[in-house]
Amino acid sequence: METMQNPLGDFPYALPKIDTSKAINFIPEAKIFEQLEQADADPVRVRDIIAKALDKQRLDPEEMATLIAADTPELTEEIFAAARELKMRVYGNRIVLFAPLYVGSDCINDCKYCGFRCSNKQAGRDTLSFDRLKDEIHALVDGGHKRLIMVYGEHPKYSPEFIAETVRTVYSQKFGNGEIRRVNINAAPLDVEGFRTVKASGIGTYQVFQETYHQPTYADMHPTGPKSNYLWRLSAFDRAMEAGIDDVGIGALMGLADWRFETMSLLYHTIHLEDHFNVGPHTISFPRIEPAIGTGFNENPPNAVSDHDFKRLVAILRLSVPYTGLILTCRESVELRNEVLQFGVSQIDAGSSIGIGAYAAKDEDTHRKSQFELADNRSLDEVIRELCEVDFIPSFCTGCYRLGRTGEHFMEFAVPGFVKRYCSPNAILTFQEFLEDYASPETLKVGNRQIDREVARLNDTQRPGVAERLARVRNGERDLYF
Ligand code: SAM
Ligand code: SF4
């Protein structure tokens, strides 16, 4: 650890101690290519696999490979229909909403696709001071947000202590009726000690993307810095679990290697976590590469994923890992987002700004400080209104996390009727809070109609309890959950 002090506060500069002696490479590269090549999309077999998925069983890699091979229009339609049905059966019509909060763009890595890479001379480097961080929180809370993902470049100044303090700062802020109730983080892999420090600050999910699971592509994309170590990154969650973080989010950046290989690898990663820690990832992300300032590489990524293949990958993931949340971000267009929401996405961001300081400052310069560009620039209010119009119920629920129902104890799906008993009522109550405190008149109207529809869908045992709490929320009480 260096002794230099961090100008942002009294935090030591620190990089993790990279040690891969205990790391396992659980991505069988040659075998995955073999499985993809040998997959036979016989319609009878494909339908058997769909039936297994609809029975909410996690698929095996050979089965996923068969779904990937099933690319005729007819079978593709059957896969889409099954994904829609499974999503409704497991998750219902809830969509969890969050916002990304970029803390700092300094970075010592040189990822070819990222606007923050160290060799990018056009990048505007910036890190939020704690005062600016509070301003960002204020703006986010005033917009109605309750859940954040905080994002950091990889740099010794973003030490575990610094990350932990930014998280604690977020939780400490209250504005009117509002506060951030759950903070997830997306940050470079840490050592076990570093993960312990960050866990102690009360993070929700720890997220880090492998970017590409294909080792030769990985080496090409990440020429220098700690991120050039494939195995260190691949083993990040093993160390996080050792440190007690059992709520993790995996992901791959689509466009680097063949999406079929990446999707299979995401399943292998899931199986590794299940086998070793008894708990799979909480979420999977599959962002596609977006344009970024000073980053010509992104104009023509080597394995760009078409909209059609993107929809197939979402539907196939939904069927393969029925109990894992799927995240879709504002990188994607409104049209595509609306379509794949039906296939099994369970969390989306909304009203997002990804410039450093962009929520509070709203100045032009924050664009230069962005990691990449967003395609969906609707406000949270608009997204919510549009979700209600197509019969989704927006949810800001953080009940499980705050009652310790995470990771191994993540009972959402293990306990029969859990979603009906807890998730649906909590979605209704947290959505009513949003409507009372932040909605525009138009969204208030559409939203109240949606709440009425949802209450009518509850069973007779549940309805009185939810109605009683709803009345309390309308009378000004906050943070009621089951
Ligand atoms: N620096 C940490 C790391 O690399 O893991 C965490 C933050 S990084 C800013 C978050 C994620 O943004 C990366 O894991 C990568 O998948 C994604 N990303 C980077 N450049 C992108 C681009 N041009 N388009 C879309 N996503 C991008
Ligand atoms: Fe740095 Fe992360 Fe961007 Fe790579 S993806 S340059 S590590 S911020």
Image: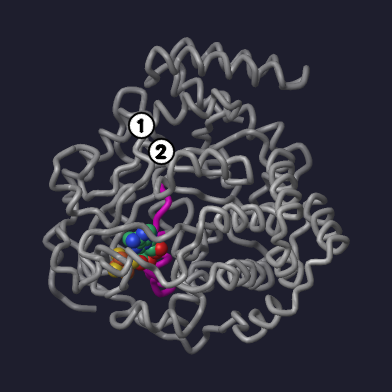
Secondary structure under tag 1 reads: loop
Q: Quadrant of residue 388?
A: top right
The quadrant of the image that shows the N terminus is bottom left
Give the residue furthest to the bottom: 21
Quadrant holding the C terminus: top right
CB contact under 8 Å: marks 2 and 1 = yes
Instruction: Examine the image and state in which quarter residue 319 appears.
Output: bottom right
Q: State the CA–CA distance, disc 2 to disc 1.
A: 6 Å
Q: Which of these two is toward me, 49 or 417?
A: 49
Give coordinates of residue 278: x percent, y percent: 68, 65
Residue depicted at x 33% and y 29%? 143
Q: Does dot 2 land on a helix, a strand or a loop?
A: loop
Mark 2 C-beta closer than 8 Å to ligand 1: no
Which residue does the numbered mark 1 point to in the structure image? 379
Disc 2 marks a residue whose amino acid type is Ala
Identified at 52% across, 44% down, the residue is 347
Ligand 2 shows up in the quarter that is bottom left
Are there few (<14), some (14-19), or many (20+) residues within 10 Å of tag 1?
A: few
Q: Which residue is mark 2?
A: 350
**Range of the magenta residues?**
183-198
| Sooner in the amino-acid sequence: mark 2 or mark 1 | 2
